[in-house]
Amino acid sequence: MSENRRKRWSKIWPSLFITTVVLCFGASLLPTGMGQASAAVPPLESTVPTSCGASTASPRHYQVAASPETIHWGFYSKNLAPIISVNSQDYVTLETITHHAGDDYDRMIAGDPAIEAIYNWTAEEKTVSDRGPGVHILTGPVYVCGAEPGDLLEVRMVDLKLRPSGTDPSKTYGSNAAAWWGFQYDNHKEDPKPREVITLYEMDATGELDYATAVYRYKWTPQTTPDGTVHETIDYPGIIVDHDTVDEIGETLEGVKVPLRLHLGSMGVAPSEAEVVDSIPPSYFGGNIDNRNIAIGTAMYYPIAVPGALFSGGDAHASQGDSELDGTAIETSITGVFQFVLHKQANLAGTILEGVNYPLLETPDSWIVHGFTYPNYLEALGEDAQSEIYTLSSLDPALKDSSAKLRDFLMNGMNLSEDEAFSLITVGADFAITQVVDGNWGVHGIIPKGIFDPANVKPKPGLS
């Protein structure tokens, strides 16, 4: 370094240092868009409470490991016994297991005792025999003490980590199924038409690499389950594919790196309308929303329909694009850390969350409302709702529902008139196709936080 540069730097450095200190101190005083929960996660407790106790001065942190006893396969239900009870602001580490692990047993099941136990199915024994009417393996439910119908449950995504493969802890694998329920199934160009194709992806379980690469693909062939049933298509959850019956094509998506977007496709609280509810169609209670934006550092708000809320989560995704066009994301297993914050109905009046009776996502820079073909298909379609919804889905009503919810959110939370709201939606909001594969199709509306004067935005409710 030249003498002149040294002199110049010696004069500038003290000013830069002082400026940096002042800016950092000032930034610490600014209001933040979301709670900084991850910075204060307490250490894990050694026990898992199964009944409600008195809340403590500071939040607690518990862990629920995946096992046949802590998961339910293919449904939400208000009748499920909770596997854990927590107070508002407590943290829970939940292990979630993919329902597509059977697409490659060696990479996604073998060597992992928990997944082996969950998938165990022989001619003599089927460990988890209650599968359906949906397909997702859900961990839970979590009972939130004090939660009552009419309240709102905030679930903060504090951390998400890929579950290492049981045969190679440095790697994680995921499966994408281009399946019969995919939007593209009747729109193939090449033969054979139609067809189902599995593409297996590999990820770095250490977290050093932030992308997935394809390992191989294969066309689905008829598979026989231990009960002797032949499955011509992917029509039952947890089928373990016999790889002696398929041809693996290794030259797949060569040179392509898919950015990771870790999220849970299905999270929600128990609905009240039926005893057992299919895990596939999403609705007002959340469920299988499949929004790739529900990531680390975001929070979902769910309207509570039954005492205790009964939250469950699963259907973990390594990455997914809007629409989930061919049927699935990169389905994998993920361990997540979640904070549960209860907002009592009486505390919602006069806040930005007043009137929220639908799944609402908050990111650091946006609010995202979720619209569906039917906002509450269980109520709208009556006793045959869980079968009829698969024949009635359309994006037109989903967009109308999403835009109406966003209008209401802006009118309430930002004190806008209806005309102001629709103008702002048109010029300042974005709509995206959440998914077109889950029975009750979804469109989400995104409004940036930064376009509002904070003085015109209603506050959030205080912590319970």
Image (tube, rainbow, N blue to C red):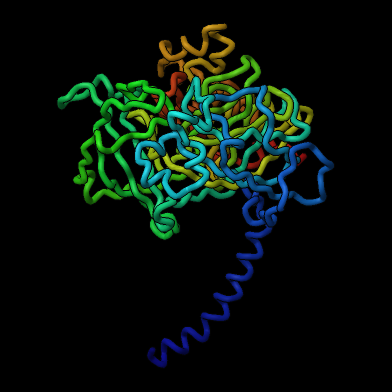
Residue at point 24%, 33% (across, down): 245
Residue 290 place in picture, x, y as percent: 46, 32
Residue 394 showing in the rendered view = yes
Q: Residue furthest left?
A: 191
Return the residue nearer the eye: 181 or 359.
181
Q: Where the C terminus falls, by quadrant?
A: top right
Give how far across and how far down residue 56 sits, in percent: 82, 48
**Residue situated furthest front in the rendering:** 124
Q: Is residue 90 left or right of residue 188?
A: right
Q: Is residue 260 above or below residue 220?
A: below
Q: Is residue 235 above or below residue 240?
A: above
| Residue at 68%, 29% in the rendered image | 81
Asked whether residue 402 appears in the rendered view, the answer is: no
92 on left or right of 266 = right
Residue visible at 54% across and 26% down? 406
In this view of the protein, which residue sits in the foreground, 107 or 180? 107
- Quadrant in which residue 443 is drawn: top left
- Count of numbered labels shown in the rendering: 0
Q: Is residue 56 left or right of residue 215?
A: right
Most distant residue in the bottom direction: 3
The answer to which of 391 and 117 lies nearer the viewer is: 117
Position of the N terminus by quadrant: bottom left
Q: Is residue 191 left or right of residue 110?
A: left
Q: Nearer the viewer, residue 365 or 278?
A: 278
Where is residue 360 shown, x and y percent of the image?
Answer: 58, 31
Residue 413 point in image, percent of width and height: 64, 31
Q: Residue at x 63, y 25 (%)?
A: 270
